[in-house]
Every structure is written in C-alpha cells, then in structure tokens.
Amino acid sequence: MTKHIRRLLILLVVLVMVAAACGDDDDGGEADGTTGTTAAPTGTTAADEGPDLELPASCDNEQGVTDDSITITVLTDLSGPISTVGGIEHGQAFKAYFDALNAAGGIDGRTVEVDIRDMKYDPVTAAGEYEQVRTETAMVADILGSAAIDAVAADMEQDCLITFQGATNGVLAQTYTSVFSPATSAGHDVVNGVAYALEQNPDATFAVAYQGDAYGEALKAAGDFAAETEGFEWLEQVTFGPRDTDLTAQTQALLAADPDYVVYGGLPTQLAALSAGVAAAGNDMVFLIPTGAWSPALLGTPAADAIVANVIVITPYAAWGGDEEGVVQMREDIAEHAPDVKPGSPAQTGYNAATVAGAVLQTASESGDLTLGGIYRAAATLELDNGGIVPPHAYGSRAEEPRIPSTETRIWTPSTTAEGGVEPLVEGTVSYDLSQQYVESGA
C-alpha cells in the first residue's frame, strides 16, 4: 500500500463495496468497531441492488474530475454569525486534511482541490453558491448548517451530489439521499445527554431552548422523543433566531420555569447569552449542548465562567490531545497546513468530514468509477474507522438502514485549562438505550 493511501485512511478503512457480490447482506445495524484490511471494491454494490433505490440519470455524469485533479466544494461560514466561533476554522481544518493528502500523492495521483465558499450561515446565500458549482464539482463535500443543507439538498439529489454535514443533523440524512452524517448525529447527542442527566437525577426537570430553523427543530424533535419516552414534560420552551442578540425574554422565561436542565439546540453565540443571563440571576440550571452548539472560543468571552459552571457538552469527538492514531495525525496535519487553527471542535468537525470524503473518493477511484454515481455508491456502502477521531461509523442502502452511522458520544465539561476547551465528565464513549430507541423509531 502506498504512503498516500495509508495517510488517507489513517487507520483501517473497511470498504464493504463487495457486500452484495459476496452475498453478505447488511443487517441494518450500527458499526461495531470491527476493522480489516483495505481492498479495492469489485462486483455489484449494495447500493446498486438496494430495493427501491433509484439513482437519477445525472449519476452517469463525471464532473470536477480530470486526469490530474478532483475538485470538491465546502460551503461554510466565513463572514456570518458563526464565522469567528467555528466557521472559518472548520473550513481550514477540512482543507488541511487534503493538503496533507496531496503532499503525499493525492487520490491515486490526482490532486484534490478544495473550493471553500462563504455561505454566511444563510440558506439563500448557500443556494446561490451551490448554483455556481453544481455542474463543476465532484462533491459538495461539507456544508455547515442545517438550514443551508435543507435549502439545497433536494437539488443535490437530482444532481447526484453528496455532502457530509459538519455538525451533523440526522434528520436531514434521513430525509435526503444526498446527505450523510460523518459522525453521531446532534440529535443523538441530545438524547444521550438527556439519558445522562436522568442517570444523575431520575427526577430531573427540563426546558428546551432552540433555534427556529432546521437545525434547532431537529434537536427539539430529539428532545421531544426523549421527553415522551421518559415521561416528562418541558417546563418551558423558548426559541430564537441564529442572528438574535437580545435574548432577555428567553432568559426570563427560563428563569421563571427554573428547570434543572435546558436542552439547547442553537449556536454558540446564543448559548453564551442565555447561560450568562441565567448565571447572573444566580440560577445554576445546566445547559445540555450538542456538537454544533459548542466552540472553545466561548471561553474567551465574558460568559466563560457561566459556561464552565453550567454547561455540559455532548459530542462524539475525542480529546484534542488524545493519543489515538487518527487524532495524532489530525494535530500534525493541522499544525503543518493550517497553523492558525485553534484546538477544538470546529477544527475536529471539519477535519473529520474531510476524512470521510477522502475515503469515499479513494473508494470510487479504486473501483475505477469517479462518476457522480460511483462516488454516491462509494459513500452509501462505506464503513470507516478513522483512527479514533470519532467512533467507527457505517452507512448503507437507504431502503435498508436508517442512515445513522453511530450513536456513541462523549460527555464533557468546558475547561479554560484543557487543550481543546473540554475535559471528560465521563470517561470513554457512551450510548444509552434511549439513543438506540431513537434509532429504532426511525428518527
């Protein structure tokens, strides 16, 4: 195996593109962490034969691919509400992975060119940027923001383009064949967080604070599932917009309800406002937040003390300073190719999405099929262990699997001294029964 393929796959990538040809039916379960040797896929793929799976004619197209290069696109926030708390670094870390890969030989000799575009965390802008690349790119590899994905995913289905969403929303992966989650979904983060809270206090009370768009509503839905299954009701439900700066009314509503925990589904900036507001009133309610709500940049704001005291972060990403092989490689690649990127989850989400996109491109290249359909089929039957950055995850034919790659997550507490801004509240990964029930519900 060449050096650049070893770097691409980091640890062990099990490519199950031969599943149907070998007569090995997928049971629809989750990745079990089993690893093996990398093999170029041959024969008929599960995605070809999956019942009711019809690929559009556009899947026959080959675009963004030359003898020397593969062009892929990233839509992230470079100037909008989350640009300085993650959007910029998310894109830089994504590109750092491919810069390192290109330095080691690329994808079978092809350089991967990453076109990073500013969608300003705005679905209209995202749709406009998509129109600019839809016939030129091999993959819209990463789109930051559920509302932005929701604005283009149906068109992507027709264009046979796929994306691996950075801060993943499992509902979108359930809804659109074009969307894949590159890690445990934020909804399952929420469900695991509620289960953890109830484990600490079976009589705990809850409120929910969420962003009024596809991202927040998906997390609210996950919280609703947990509430119905566990038999509690929200003491309060408040909502806000991604650009709202005055959250006084929402803060007062939460204070009046006085829950033990707030399930939070929004951006880091609104989290800072709410947590600081309730802490200033002397309240110690705890905010349960998934991956997309967290940024270590918050620890440099006036809300830092409140966040350290009253926030629990639920995310599948390993410790930034961990010794897992993939994590070490991530740090080295980012240090060399994006040295201004700070340790933390924005960089991890970007880099992780890049490892999945890279494995898919390598699979398609090894199969000799870099058409859009070849890339799609490579994604739809991929199992990946990227060296511990996130738990092992797997996809499969939409008609056979719920497209939830993993339900494992980690429970963290913010820290101003820990590298990456968090330290473990619970050692290792967890996946509560409640989260598995959420998968079985079809969510």
Image (cartoon, helix red, strand yellow):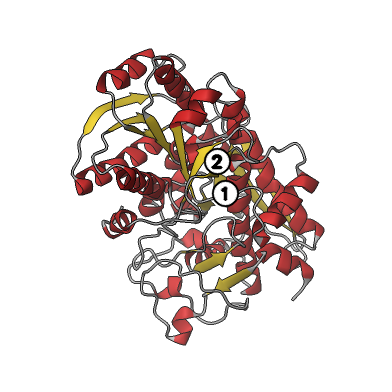
Who is closer to the viewer here, 315 or 123? 315
> Which residue lies most toward the bottom here?
22
Badge 2: residue crowd in 10 Å (few <14, some 14–19, many ≥20): many
Q: In which quadrant is the N terminus drawn?
A: bottom right
Q: Which kind of residue does numbered mark 2 sit on? A: Tyr
Q: Residue at x 41, y 52 (%)?
A: 173
Position of residue 399 in the picture relative to residue 351 (left or right)? left
Q: Which kind of residue does numbered mark 1 sit on? A: Val
**What SS does tag 2 mark?**
helix
Which residue bears the numbered disc 1?
140
Who is closer to the viewer here, 218 or 263? 263
Which label was assigned to residue 175? Answer: none
Position in image of residue 416 (x %, y %): 61, 32
Which residue bears the numbered disc 2?
130
Q: Are marks 1 and 2 in contact (CB under 8 Å)?
A: yes
**Which quadrant of the figure has residue 421?**
top right
Position of residue 395 in the picture relative to residue 337 (left or right)? left
Comes first in the chain, label 1 or label 2: 2
The answer, for residue 137, to whether it is visible in the render is no
Q: Residue at x 47, y 33 (%)?
A: 123
